[in-house]
Amino acid sequence: MASGKEIRGKIQSIKNTQKITSAMEMVAASKMRKAQERMESSRPYAEKMNEVVTHLAHASTEYKHSYLETRDVKRVGYIVISTDRGLCGGLNVNLFKKVLQSMQSYQEKGVEIDTCVIGSKASSFFKRFTKIVSSVTQIGDKPRLETLIGLIKTMLDAYDEGNIDKLYIVHNQFENTMSQIPNLIQMLPVSLNENKKERSIKYHWDYLYEPDAEEVIDKLLKRYIEAMVYQGVVENIASEQAARMVAMKSATDNAGDLIGDLEMAFNKARQASITQELSEIVAGAAAV
Amino acid sequence: MAITMHLNIVSAEEEIYSNPAEMVIVPGSAGELGILPQHAQLLSSLKPGEVIITKPGGEQQSIFISGGIVEVQPHVVTVLSDTAIREDDLDKEKAEQAKQHAEEILNSSEGLDDHDLVKAQAELLQAIEQLKLIDKLRNKRSH
């Protein structure tokens, strides 16, 4: 049995770890609240965008944008959004699993893959077996759309030039504090199969375009994609904080359990040594 | 009282304005556009500039936007504002940066090029098993 001193050292070190994990839990909780607010505040833009783009896709426009047309798939692109830091449970692992499944199904069909990563976890994971076209890391807690523009542009250019025929975005969707779901969405070509019923009634008119339809639609669709990626990043950050909060909470709890066990062992060891000393004294006295 | 329309000014990062308005002047790419209620449906791109809002009662407010798109419906006007000044050259530069960053990451890989999907999947499975094990241990403890 380990000696009392050794056990005491272990208890102390676990207590220190517990302090750190519980501090991290609290930090994550407050960051999560802020991230959630940010998620809410970017929602009106995304919703409005969706509305306008849905309308555009169904309206009788004289100009058909390449983002709205399906092509034969020879090469697909993925935008994978991960976290920069670890200690957030299985958040990234679950996400990567989902991406790999989808990638594998394409690889079996002989389709090539381009990846574009946000966050250092994804970049260190995917650099080993796929072609990373562009990446952004260290986005921080307050992401700016500005930092994402470059990355999105590389993918959009690749689509324009015909280097990729489909573009997916993968990120963790924030359901609630306890659950975050890895989500794989097709971004390009823009798929708008919802609202089919409403189409005939609602969308029989068309906009006036200024300066001209081509330019406005092009700009609009680019902004639409950017808004989707931004929304994904913001949601992923909220998921990260929530996952970290839960992970740190269970780490704190586990540390508490361990401390309990060790204290028990420590007390037993102490009691054993007292008993031993006593019996030695008694035996000594009897001998005299 | 004069007729009003609903005006939304939103950017990808936040909602800037969402209230009724009597009139709004936006910096359209082909010149300033004054929009009154019951305007025909219109979609126009915007230059960086000032959006001038006339609120019900005649009070005016101006908001600076760095470009974007305006969508006009007879009773609702939505300004989808950009969050940054956008120029093609600037965007291109950023794209280059993102590409360079990716190359740096790829170059920093040491002796890992023999990896493939299958191997990575095996690693993932391992990680998932570990996670499961941790969960199991945790449950055992709580019983």
Image (spheres, coloured by chain):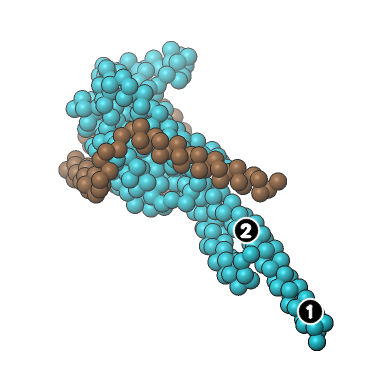
Chain colours: A cyan, B brown
Q: Secondary structure at mark 2?
A: helix
The amino acid marked with disc number 2 is: Leu
Q: Are marks 1 and 2 in contact (CB under 8 Å)?
A: no
Work out whether residue A37 or residue B133 is closer to the camera in this orientation and state it. Answer: B133
Q: CA distance from mark 1 to mark 2?
A: 37 Å
Residue B85 image point, x, y percent: 26, 46
* Residue lying at 38% horizontally and 50% vertically, measured from the top left: A84
Q: Is residue A198 visible?
A: yes
Classify 10 Å Cα crowding around label 2: few (below 14), some (14-19), many (20 and above).
some
Q: Quadrant of residue B36?
A: top left
Relative to A141, A24 lies left or right: right
Residue A266, image x, y percentages: 67, 67
| Residue at x 54%, y 50% (from the top left corner) | A247
Residue A203, position as x, y percentages in the image = 40, 17
Task: Point out residue A70 in the picture as x, y percentages from the top left corner.
Answer: 30, 18
Indicate left or right for B60 with B131 as reference. Answer: left
Q: Above or below — where is B140 with respect to B41? A: below
Residue to which mark 1 is pinned: A283
Residue under numbered circle 2: A258
* Disc number lying in front (1 or 2): 1
Identify the residue at the far top of this view. Answer: A200
Q: Residue at x 56, y 45 (%)?
A: B134
